[in-house]
């Protein structure tokens, strides 16, 4: 019977010499429900063969039928394909002879041990994409996985999330797919046992297709029928919770399962056409291993609804999660056809799929088949919905019944009796025998008991295998179902009344159904014998069931034990070992090959086994243990490859490489791939290991064997690596220069591109590239090397200057710069290499400036500052002067001329600081930004660079800084905050510098002369604070220089006071006005007088004195007679004299409002009439009333009589002024003089003021007599040094010499009175004073100014010898002899024009003035008379540095090229011009920042208001003035509010101004385009600029990362760089296209402009960074330019009736 069974059943394939079978082709959708080995695969194979042969033999020209055989197992697919080819070969060899067949067999070599699943899919000789399949590829035999990948390659992008499901030949992606092993090892431990069996229902069922995301929701899952889905019917809620947990873990691990893969394909196919050509016939084997949704996917492949063939065995669905039924598949396919009826061929009708069963079992004999059939009957009886209803299965021949060993327990005998024999000899099972156990634990227990007796496999491992003899060991004992539930099978035994009631609790017995299916698989593994060994009581129900049906043989102790072990030959062991190997049963295969003594095959199986162990450790063991396991497996494969040949060798190396990959050893993996001739993978792994040298060698040697896409990517990353590192590549990276240059441009590898350009002598391009990437040093070197461009030298110079401006910015010392890195020394050296003759003078001067700064050459900087001022380059001038005045200067040794030059330069420095302080918007001025190293960023943000002056200011108080953000380059802040910081800092510098200079000026002697030294040539004081000057040096030039230095200092201080309005400056103003008064009115006539003042030598000429007028005015308001009582009269007389001298017309107005002129201490009130004596003083100086001279006399009488504290020199000035006025008015009186003032000799300064000649004044002789009496007492007090405690001098005490000096001065006045007024009342008093002095003992010191000589000469003249008449001009003779032309002569001889020829010329008088009218005398005497005239208030105030708001700025006229006038913001232009403007081309904001020259008096007056202390204006203004002030104040406040609340973005405003300027050109034509040009376009351009700025920032960021990040990120960074570079080029192109000056706007093409807006929108979408804040501006531009205007239909007005009359 065994022979018959072997002949009829086991010999399946016999090659006949002739073609002896006929094929019948069926065209019908078939579902074959077959037992496991009923040749269902053979049935499908012969159908494929029949259709193929029918096409081959057809005489009609018809397309080749496309047939695909699909199964889950690659082994099965391969075997079926081999079987098919053998059948074709059999047909083709029908005519061959036996000899020819023998030769062909000799050429056939058996394939080695290689797991077919390891073979690269890329080597399967079929395309990687389904759409690339051709007729030659059919019929096609492949796995479902391979087919899915081919479809995915067509419809899914690798970038898609679903694309990861289909990585081909990628070892890294192996663990991402949730197979049974992955689930069991990585997921199962996190769930309760028996979880996985129903999970496939949730995602893989037909119901799941209708649910969101392809997942059956909880309610639908819970409603599934219990009969069709009995597993865990009462625990579905818990199971769904666990499914959700499984999904969560899967998502966290980025895993995917079979259902995810199919859903991804179906989702795409819903919206896309099927790729490629559909097939004609589809054959699906082992259909029970697929999900229902897989069937939908497979159905869409076949265009022929009758060309579908599904085969499977539902009784063998023991795989995890399987609940397949053909009935479900049949119904599902029918519903699919209903939905897709439109795809049926024409005329076809919808039919139910045909279903048939092959009930003949060709594997096992009848004894085994009958036993297995009874198990199916139990399943069908109790769980009919879990399995298809089948006809009873039949065997071909009858055979031995299965043997059931029962009663064998410890009380009887051990298992060894029948496993090892009765005599204790070792029995070994043969190659075709197997022991089946429940699981791995059971196998291990059995081996521990009996050792290696043969093949021991688990039931799950045995699926798909066949054995002659099978021993099913302890199946029931190891079952999870207890005896009470197993007893349910007794319901199948007639007469068993003790069987449990199944219908009462179906769900309780659901586990028995699964157990029966597993039992069925175990039974059907046997071909000849099945032995069941089980000691458990749980086996009794099934044993009773089989025994009742006479389907088993019971073997009990005491009966004959059948002989189990059968010996096998080595060939049989080897053959079965290969079979086991093909089914991945490596441990069992090892056993077989060991029995066959095949050591190589054992090593191979051990390598595969080690790999399986490593794979099972993933997600379970520690990562280090996992890598170690894979590394061990890799080494094992490498050892196998060393002894293998041919394809085996390559495959083992490939397996080794895959394991090395998963072990994390990319370098070894690459070496193994290279040995396996997997050049693509080798190159990739070398790249991943960072061995770019080896990657290049692989690409160079095997580039043709690597896909073009991979080759391009690897070449790119290798190039990026070597260009980002200093390593030299082992091979050339490019074949041509242009290719390399293009690559470097695409990836923005600027440094490498510049080096490439330099290597080809394209230095100018390289320099420009270096410059654009902020590498100035390299740029300069390249510019210097270039000789192709005329401007190379100038570009090099500009670059050097830009660097110097950055490093040597404002307030940065040369030492701190020189001590910086080497780059500064390089730039200094490069600057010396420049060809200066090719540079402009301005550029040469700038280079000289920085060279002088770095070398500390301050004298050169002084000269350069003057040059820069002439060139209108104020930033450079300020930088020069800042370094000049940064060092400590000893001003005490300065001469007057040196002080004048120093203060003139310092005034220029202070003026430039003040210009910056008052500039309307310094951040818009390129020169200012460059001077302070401020960088403009995107938007309204600015960067304050590290190490700069402003950065240091922030660092001083950075703890409290909230308005600035710190960056690696410095601090960023808004325009307003940076401007405020700049102004605050400059204001502080201005204050510190001016204050320091002021202190040094106060210590300098040149501001005051030492009279002691001047007269005697000797000064006894130690460290005299006054200047020692010889009389010989005194001249008009010296006098004017002394006055000039005072005015320079006043102008300098005014800058500080204007910048700091709240500084208390009253004392400083009074002190410097006191010094100025003394300089203009020195104590002694030989020092000079106002008549010697030359306005051409004064600072800023008339404009400079306007500041003096302002000081005088403010001093009046601040002078408090009670607070400064000790110096009050001196200060009052001084500023009153200055005010009426310089500002006669305006002085009365502000003097009358001054507090000091309203009231004062009682000492200044005359007792008789209670008159405030200050009024007499003011009346005297003003000289506008009849009694002004008398008022002056009364004032002097009050001072002298009351001995009021006063400076003697100022008192003498006042006496001279009153007496001079008296003499002039006496001699001008026509009653006494026919020719007024003819032959008068007076000091020039007495004749300077026109009011002394224009207004009629009363001369009161008695009152003058009283004054002379007081003068006589004053002279006596000075002579004897008694009673003079109320007198004082500046910087000196009264010495005999000084007293003699002032006595001499008074005597000169007396002589002039006596000479010009012959009235006895006065002359006698003068004579008495002179004679009184003559009678006294003369002073002991005989110096040139000793009064004794004058007194002696006067006495000689007025008391001649007896007989001689007194000389009429004796006083004059004595006076002239006393003066003797020493110092600065100040006498003038007035001669009337009519008497000129008759008047003798007196050579002793230095000057003779011929006049016709007396009013001409002041104008003829001195240019200073111009000052005394009335000057308009507008002129007087417009040039004064104004206080308060920063917009206030002085306006002065420049009269001398070498003088630096008062600051005007517009002047801070020139070399530091505004962006976009040429030098000096400044467009001011006419509405807010400039004032018309014809502004009214009130408008100008308001500018002074903030600088004046209103509390001092006790004499209130008039009602009209108050009203005018209110109007001005309100107007100004509105202006400030409008400016502060300005809503326009400064960037938009600047672009608008540029656009506006373009529209003002002559060739611009107005129209609708102009509205778009001025309206929406600026908003669009600001968006574009912001996008470009963000893109540049991203470029800088990636550039920094490129050299820092590891090589693993090179691809990512390369893509980023390439994308950003492309985006930036696009942005710059759009800027050039849309900028206001673009020629495209001249064409006025609105469509082109709209297209530009859309391109900007696309550009903005790609910008890396947030552009949300620009959306409003872009929308404004879009709506204005692109969006179509919607015109609302208004109510149409009725037309007026036509007037026909």
Image (spheres, grey):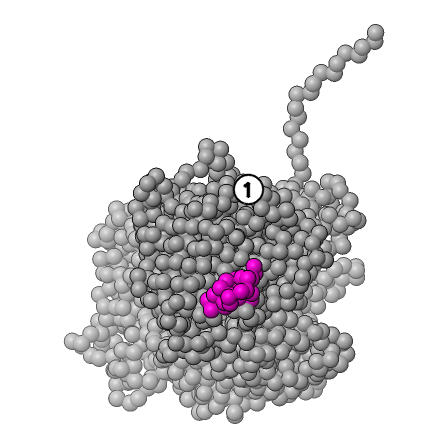
Q: Residue placed at 21% from the left, 53% from the top?
A: 498
How busy is the neighbourhood of tag 1: few (under 14 within 10 Å), some, or many (20 plus)? some
Rendered view: 314 above or below 1531: below
Give the magenta part as a residue range: 1351-1376
Q: Residue placed at 62% from the left, 88% from the top?
A: 730
In the drawing, does residue 838 fall left or right of residue 158? right
Rendered view: 1356 above or below 607: above
Task: Find out whether residue 1373 is within the magenta segment.
Answer: yes
Q: Residue lying farthest front?
A: 1363
| Residue annotated with mark 1 | 1256
- Where residue 1034 sits, quadrant-wise, is bottom right
- Where residue 253 appears, x then y in whole percent? 41, 65
Residue nearest the viewer, comparing 333 with 1243: 1243
Q: Quadrant of the C terminus?
A: top right
Badge count: 1
- Where residue 1572 appears, x then y in whole percent? 68, 44
Q: Secondary structure at mark 1?
A: loop
Rendered view: 991 above or below 1016: above
């Amino acid at each position: 019977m065994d022979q018959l069974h072997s002949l009829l059943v086991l010999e399946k394939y016999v090659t006949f010499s002739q073609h002896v079978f006929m094929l019948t082709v069926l065209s019908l959708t078939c579902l074959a429900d077959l037992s496991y080995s009923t040749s269902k695969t053979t049935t499908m194979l012969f159908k494929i063969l029949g259709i193929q042969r029918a096409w081959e033999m057809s005489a009609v020209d018809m397309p080749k039928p496309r047939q695909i055989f699909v199964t889950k197992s690659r082994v099965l697919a391969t075997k079926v394909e081999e079987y098919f080819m053998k059948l074709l070969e059999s047909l083709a060899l029908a005519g061959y002879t036996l000899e020819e067949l023998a030769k062909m067999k000799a050429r056939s070599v058996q394939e080695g041990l290689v797991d077919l699943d390891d073979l690269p899919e890329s080597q399967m000789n079929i395309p990687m994409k389904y759409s690339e399949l051709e007729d030659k590829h059919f019929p096609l035999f492949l796995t479902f996985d391979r087919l899915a990948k081919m479809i995915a390659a067509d419809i899914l992008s690798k970038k898609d999330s679903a694309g990861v499901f289909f990585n081909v030949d990628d070892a890294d992606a192996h663990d991402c797919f949730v197979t049974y092993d992955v689930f069991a090892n990585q997921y199962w431990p996190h769930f309760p046992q028996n979880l996985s069996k129903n999970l496939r229902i949730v995602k893989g069922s037909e119901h799941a297709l209708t649910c969101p995301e392809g997942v059956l929701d909880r309610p639908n899952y819970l409603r599934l029928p219990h009969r069709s889905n009995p597993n865990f019917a009462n625990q579905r809620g818990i199971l769904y919770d666990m499914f959700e947990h499984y999904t969560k873990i899967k998502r966290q691990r980025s895993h995917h399962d079979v259902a995810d893969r199919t859903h991804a394909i179906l989702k795409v196919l819903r919206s896309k056409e099927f790729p490629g050509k559909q097939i004609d016939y589809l054959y699906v084997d082992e259909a029970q291993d697929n999900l229902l949704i897989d069937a939908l996917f497979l159905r869409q492949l076949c265009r022929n609804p009758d060309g579908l063939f599904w085969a499977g065995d539902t009784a063998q669905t023991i795989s995890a999660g399987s609940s397949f039924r053909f009935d479900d598949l049949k119904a599902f396919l029918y519903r699919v056809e209903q939905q897709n009826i439109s795809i049926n061929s024409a005329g076809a009708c919808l039919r139910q799929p045909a279903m048939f069963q092959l009930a003949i079992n060709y594997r096992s004999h009848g004894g085994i088949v009958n036993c297995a059939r009874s198990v199916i009957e139990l399943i069908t009886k109790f769980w009919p919905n879990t399995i298809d209803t089948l006809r009873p299965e039949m065997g071909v021949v009858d055979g031995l019944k299965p043997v059931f060993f029962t009663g064998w327990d410890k009380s009887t005998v051990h298992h060894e009796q029948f496993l090892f024999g009765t005599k204790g000899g070792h029995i070994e099972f043969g190659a075709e025998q197997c022991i089946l156990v429940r699981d791995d634990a059971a196998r291990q227990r059995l081996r521990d008991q009996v050792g290696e007796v043969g093949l021991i496999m688990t039931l799950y491992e045995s699926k798909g295998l066949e054995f002659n003899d099978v021993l099913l060991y302890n199946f029931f004992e190891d079952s999870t179902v207890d005896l009470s539930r197993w007893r349910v099978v007794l319901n199948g035994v007639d007469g068993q009344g003790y069987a449990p009631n199944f219908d009462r609790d179906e769900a309780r017995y659901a586990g028995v159904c699964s157990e029966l299916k597993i039992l069925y698989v175990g039974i059907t593994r046997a071909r000849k014998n099945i032995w069941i060994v089980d000691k458990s009581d749980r086996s009794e129900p099934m044993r009773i069931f089989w025994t009742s049906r006479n389907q088993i043989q019971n073997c009990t102790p005491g009966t004959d034990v059948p002989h189990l072990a059968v010996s096998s030959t080595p060939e049989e062991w080897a053959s079965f070992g290969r079979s086991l190997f093909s089914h991945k049963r490596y441990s069992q295969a090892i056993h077989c090959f060991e029995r066959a003594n095949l050591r190589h095959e054992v090593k191979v199986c051990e390598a595969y086994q080690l790999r399986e162990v490593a794979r099972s450790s993933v997600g379970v063991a520690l990562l280090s243990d996992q890598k170690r396991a894979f590394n061990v497996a890799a080494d094992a494969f490498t050892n196998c490859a060393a002894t293998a040949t041919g394809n085996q060798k390559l495959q083992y190396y490939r397996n080794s490489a895959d394991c090395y990959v998963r072990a994390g050893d990319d370098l070894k993996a690459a070496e193994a791939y290279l040995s396996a001739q997997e050049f693509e993978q080798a190159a990739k792994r070398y790249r991943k290991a960072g061995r770019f040298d080896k990657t290049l060698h692989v690409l160079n040697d095997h580039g043709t064997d690597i896909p073009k896409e991979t080759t391009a990517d690897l070449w790119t990353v290798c190039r990026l690596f070597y260009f980002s590192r200093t390593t030299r590549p082992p091979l050339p990276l490019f074949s041509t220069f242009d290719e390399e240059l293009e690559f470097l441009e695409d990836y923005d590898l600027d440094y490498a591109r510049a080096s490439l350009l330099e290597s080809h002598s394209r230095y100018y391009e390289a320099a420009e590239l270096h410059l654009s990437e902020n590498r100035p040093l390299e740029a300069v070197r390249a510019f210097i090397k270039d000789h192709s461009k005329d401007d190379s030298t100038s570009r090099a110079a500009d670059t050097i200057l830009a660097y110097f401006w950055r490093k040597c910015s404002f307030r940065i010392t040369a030492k701190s710069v020189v001590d910086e890195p080497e780059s500064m020394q390089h730039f200094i050296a490069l600057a010396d290499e420049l060809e200066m003759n090719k540079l402009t003078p301005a550029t040469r001067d700038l280079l000289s400036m920085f060279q002088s700064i770095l070398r500390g050459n301050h004298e050169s900087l002084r000269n350069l500052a003057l040059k820069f001022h002439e060139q209108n380059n104020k930033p450079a001038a300020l930088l020069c002067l800042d370094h000049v005045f940064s060092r400590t200067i000893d001003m005490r040794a300065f001469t007057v001329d040196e002080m004048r030059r120093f203060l003139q330069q310092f005034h220029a420095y202070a003026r430039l600081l003040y210009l910056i302080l008052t500039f309307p918007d310094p951040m818009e001025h390129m020169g200012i930004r460059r001077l302070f190293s401020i960088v403009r960023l995107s938007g309204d943000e600015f960067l304050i660079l590290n190490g700069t002056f402003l950065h240091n200011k922030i660092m001083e108080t950075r703890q409290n800084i909230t308005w600035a953000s710190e960056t690696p380059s410095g601090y960023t802040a808004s325009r307003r905050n940076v401007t405020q910081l700049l102004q605050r800092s400059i204001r502080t510098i201005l204050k510190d510098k001016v204050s320091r200079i002021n202190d040094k000026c106060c210590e300098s002697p040149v501001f005051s002369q030492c009279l002691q030294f001047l007269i005697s040539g000797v000064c006894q004081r130690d460290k005299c604070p006054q200047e020692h000057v010889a009389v010989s040096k005194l001249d008009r030039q010296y006098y004017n220089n002394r006055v000039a230095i005072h005015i320079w200092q006043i102008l300098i201080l005014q800058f500080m006071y204007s910048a700091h309005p709240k500084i208390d400056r009253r004392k400083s103003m009074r002190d410097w006005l006191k010094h100025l008064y003394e300089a203009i009115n020195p104590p002694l006539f030989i020092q000079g007088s106002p008549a010697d003042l030359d306005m051409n030598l004064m600072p800023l000429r008339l404009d400079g004195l306007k500041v003096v007028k302002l000081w005088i005015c403010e001093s009046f308001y601040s002078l408090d007679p009670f607070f400064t009582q000790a110096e009050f009269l001196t200060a009052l007389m001084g500023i009153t004299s200055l005010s009426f001298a310089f500002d006669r017309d305006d002085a009365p107005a502000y003097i009358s409002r001054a507090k000091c002129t309203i009231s004062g201490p009682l000492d200044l009130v005359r007792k008789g009439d209670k008159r405030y004596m200050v009024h007499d003083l003011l009346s005297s100086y003003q000289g506008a009333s009849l009694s002004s001279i008398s008022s002056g006399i009364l004032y002097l009488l009050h001072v002298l009589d009351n001995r009021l504290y006063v400076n003697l020199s100022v008192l003498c000035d006042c006496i001279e002024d009153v007496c001079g006025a008296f003499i002039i008015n006496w001699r001008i009186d026509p009653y006494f003089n026919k020719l007024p003032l003819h032959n008068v000799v007076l000091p020039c300064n007495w004749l300077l003021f026109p009011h002394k000649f224009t207004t009629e004044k009363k001369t009161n002789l008695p009152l003058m007599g009283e004054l002379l009496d007081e003068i006589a007492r004053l002279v006596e007090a000075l002579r004897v040094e008694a009673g003079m405690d109320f007198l004082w001098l500046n910087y000196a005490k009264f010495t005999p010499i000084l007293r003699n000096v002032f006595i001499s001065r008074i005597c000169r006045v007396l002589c002039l009175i006596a000479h010009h007024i012959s009235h006895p009342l006065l002359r006698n008093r003068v004579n008495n004073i002179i004679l009184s002095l003559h009678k006294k003992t003369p002073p002991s010191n005989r110096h040139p100014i000793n009064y004794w000589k004058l007194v002696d000469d006067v006495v000689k003249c007025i008391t001649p010898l007896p007989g001689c008449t007194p000389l009429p001009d004796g006083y004059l003779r004595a006076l002239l002899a006393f003066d003797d032309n020493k110092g600065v002569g100040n006498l003038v001889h007035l001669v009337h024009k009519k008497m000129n020829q008759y008047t003798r010329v007196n050579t002793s008088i230095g000057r003779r003035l011929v006049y016709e009218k007396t009013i001409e005398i002041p104008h003829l005497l001195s240019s200073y008379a111009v000052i005394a005239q009335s000057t308009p208030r507008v002129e007087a105030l417009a040039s004064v540095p104004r206080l308060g708001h920063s917009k206030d700025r002085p306006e002065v006229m420049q009269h001398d090229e070498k003088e630096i006038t008062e600051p005007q913001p517009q002047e801070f232009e020139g070399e530091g011009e505004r962006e976009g403007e040429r030098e000096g081309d400044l467009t001011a904001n006419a509405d807010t920042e400039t004032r018309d020259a014809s502004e009214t008096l009130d408008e100008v007056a308001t500018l002074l208001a903030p600088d004046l202390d209103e509390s001092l204006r006790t004499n209130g203004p008039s009602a009209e003035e108050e009203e005018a002030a209110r109007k001005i104040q309100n107007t100004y406040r509105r202006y400030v509010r409008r400016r502060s609340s300005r809503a326009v973005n400064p960037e938009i405003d600047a672009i608008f101004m540029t656009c506006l300027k373009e529209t003002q050109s002559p060739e611009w034509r107005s129209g609708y385009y102009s509205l778009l040009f001025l309206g929406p376009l600026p908003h669009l351009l600001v968006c574009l600029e912001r996008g470009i700025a963000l893109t540049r920032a991203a470029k800088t960021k990636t550039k920094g990362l490129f050299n820092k990040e590891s090589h693993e990120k090179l691809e990512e960074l390369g893509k980023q760089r390439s994308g950003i570079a492309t985006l930036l080029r696009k942005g710059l192109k759009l800027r050039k296209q849309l900028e206001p000056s673009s020629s495209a706007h001249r064409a006025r093409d609105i469509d082109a402009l709209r297209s530009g807006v859309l391109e900007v929108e696309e550009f903005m979408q790609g910008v890396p960074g947030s552009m949300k804040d620009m959306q409003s501006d872009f929308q404004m531009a879009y709506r204005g330019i692109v969006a179509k205007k919607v015109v609302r239909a208004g109510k149409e007005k009725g037309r007026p009736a036509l007037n026909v009359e």
